Image: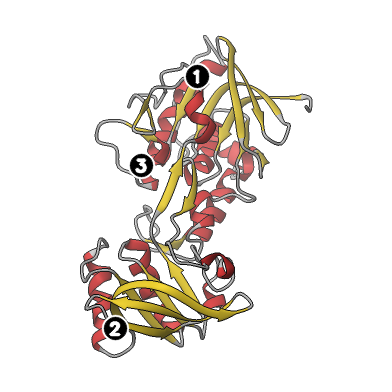
Amino acid sequence: MSDVISTDVVIIGAGPCGLFAIFELGLLDLKCHVIDILDRPGGQCAELYPEKPIYDIPALPLVTGADLTARLMEQAKPFKPQFHFNQMVTTLEKRGDNDFLLATDGGLQFAAKVVVIAAGGGSFQPKKPPIPGIEAYENGSVLYSVKKMEALRGKDILIVGGGDSALDWTNNLQPIAKSMTLLHRRDEFRAAPDSVNKMRELVAAGKMQLKIGQVTGLKGEGGVLSGATIKLADGTVEDVACNAMLPFFGLTMKLGPVAEWGLNLTENLIAVDTAKFETSVPGIFAVGDINTYPGKLKLILSGFHEAALMAQQAFRYVNPGERLMFQYTTSSTNLQRKLGVN
C-alpha cells in the first residue's frame, strides 16, 4: 500500500456532478482529490454518449457530453484538483469525527475530512441481447455505446431497441450512415415523442427502414459483421445487411462496494436530506444520480444544485467553528481572485 494521501475532500466519481463539486468546494478553499473507475473524466457523458447532444444544461442550448466535460474541467482548473483514474474505492472507514480513510483497488489510500459520492448509478454495464456468438463481434462491429460518430460514417447500421438511446442514435447517425435500420420487438417506443416522430418521418421519406421483430443470429467472418438474421412479428425470417450493430437494451447498474459502507439505501440509491445532501453518516455526501430524496429528478442540472448546497456543509466540517461568508462570484473580488479573473 502507498503512503496515505491527505486532503480536505475525496470525491468519488468524475462525472459532471463530481466535476462541478470541485468548483463549488474550491470557491470555499477546500482541496479535492477525485477518484474514478474510468480512465478519464466525464462519467457516463464520456463513456456512453460523448458526441450525443444534451439540450437541458442552462445557457447551453446544445452541448455534447464530451464538450460539457471539457467545460467543467476548465471551470475546475483554478482549484488544481488531483485525479486518480482507473481506481475503484473498495473500502471507506470512519475513524473519528470528520476523519475518513479510503482505499482503492489500485493500492492508494486517502485520509479526508469529507467524502462526496458522485458515482452516478454506480458501476454500469450494458445489457447484452441473448444472441448466439455475439461476443465474437463485440467492440468491433457490435457496439453498446458510440464513442465517435465518424467511425460509423458510411456504414450499414442496424440499431436494436426502443428507448431514448436507440431513437436518439437512429436520428443522429442516419445522416452519415450508408443505410439505417431500426429494429424493435413492437411498434411502440419508450422514447421521447419528438424522437419517435423524427424517426417515422425518416421512414416515410424512404431514408431508413423500421422493422418489427428480433435478432436471432449474426453473420460474418473474423469478427467482422456482414448481416443479421431477424424474426419478424409475423413469424417470417429475413436477413438484414449490416456491418455495424448497436443494441440498446439499457444498462445494469451496480452500487458495488458503496453498498457495504453502512449508508441508508433505498432501492440501491443513497438516501440524503435536501438541505445538505448528506447521507446517514455525517461527513459523507451523495450528489447526482446515485442519491434519492422526495421529488428527485435525475438531471445533470439537479446534481449541480445539490453540489452547491453540499459544499456549504462540507466547509463546516473541514473548518469547524469558522464563520462561512456567503459570496457571489459576480461581485466578490476574493472569489474572482481564486478564479484568476481579477
Asked whether residue 264 appears in the rendered view, the answer is yes
Q: Mark 1, residues whose alpha carbon is within 10 Å: few (<14), some, or many (≥20)?
A: many
Q: Nearer the viewer, residue 19 or 271?
A: 271
Residue displayed at 66% across by 27% down: 103
- Please, what secondary structure does the residue beneath circle 1 have? loop
* CA gap, disc 1 and disc 2: 52 Å
Q: Is residue 88 above or below residue 127?
A: above
Name the residue tied to disc 2: 202
Which of the two discs, 1 and 2, labels the residue nearer the N terminus? Answer: 2
Which of the two discs, 3 and 2, labels the residue nearer the N terminus? Answer: 2
Q: Where is residue 22? Give x, y as percent.
A: 55, 37
Q: Nearer the viewer, residue 63 or 241?
A: 241
Q: Can you say which quadrant of the picture contains the C terminus?
A: top right
Name the residue tied to disc 1: 283
Report which quarter residue 247 is drawn in.
Answer: bottom left
* CA gap, disc 1 and disc 3: 21 Å
Residue displayed at 40% across by 47% down: 300
Q: Is residue 258 above or below residue 67?
A: above
Q: Nearer the viewer, mark 3 or mark 2?
A: 2
